[in-house]
């Protein structure tokens, strides 16, 4: 399952995001989205977990949780409609 994570503290990097979700199961990938010009975090990212049950547990536990002073928004990511 692909998971969208918003309202990240700008200091959070890929490794921290991965560790946060590894508490709930195996993480295939974790990526904080950065600005192409500055390289700075845009405050959101994506995590991919292979087990849907573990992913849903992570969503349920982390959505609304405060991490590094910011309340996370965590939900299943869906492909953009064209």
Image: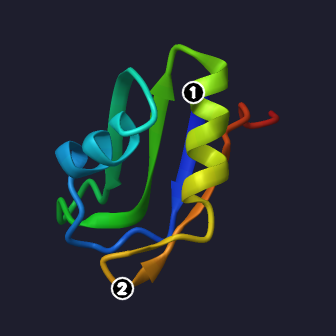
Q: Residue at x 28, y 73 (%)?
A: 10
Category of crowding for the residue at label 1, using alpha-carbon neighbours closer than 10 angstroms: few (below 14), some (14–19), many (at least 20): some
- Up-down relation of residue 2 to residue 14 (above or below): above
Depth check, front residue: 63 or 5: 63
- Up-down relation of residue 48 to residue 44 (above or below): above
Q: Position of residue 65 (x, y in %)?
A: 53, 70
Asked where in the image residue 77 lies, by quadrant, the reply is top right
Q: Residue at x 52, y 54 (%)?
A: 5
Q: Is residue 69 at all visible to an observer of this figure?
A: yes
Q: Which residue is mark 2?
A: 69
Category of crowding for the residue at label 2, using alpha-carbon neighbours closer than 10 angstroms: few (below 14), some (14–19), many (at least 20): few
Q: Secondary structure at mark 2?
A: loop
| Colour convention | rainbow
Whether residues under marks 1 and 2 lie with C-beta atoms below 8 angstroms apart, the answer is: no
Image quadrant where one finds the N terminus? top right
Q: Which residue is mark 1?
A: 54
Q: Secondary structure at mark 1?
A: helix
Q: Residue at x 45, y 35 (%)?
A: 24
Asked where in the image residue 55 lies, by quadrant, the reply is top right
20 sits left or right of 66 in the view: left
């Amino acid at each position: 399952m692909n998971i969208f994570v918003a309202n990240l503290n700008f200091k959070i990097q890929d490794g921290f995001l991965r560790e946060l979700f590894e508490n709930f199961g195996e993480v295939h990938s974790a990526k904080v989205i950065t600005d192409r010009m500055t390289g700075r975090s845009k405050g959101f990212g994506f995590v991919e977990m292979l087990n849907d049950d573990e992913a849903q547990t992570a969503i349920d536990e982390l959505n609304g949780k405060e991490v590094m002073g910011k309340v996370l928004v965590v939900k299943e990511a869906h492909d953009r409609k064209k």
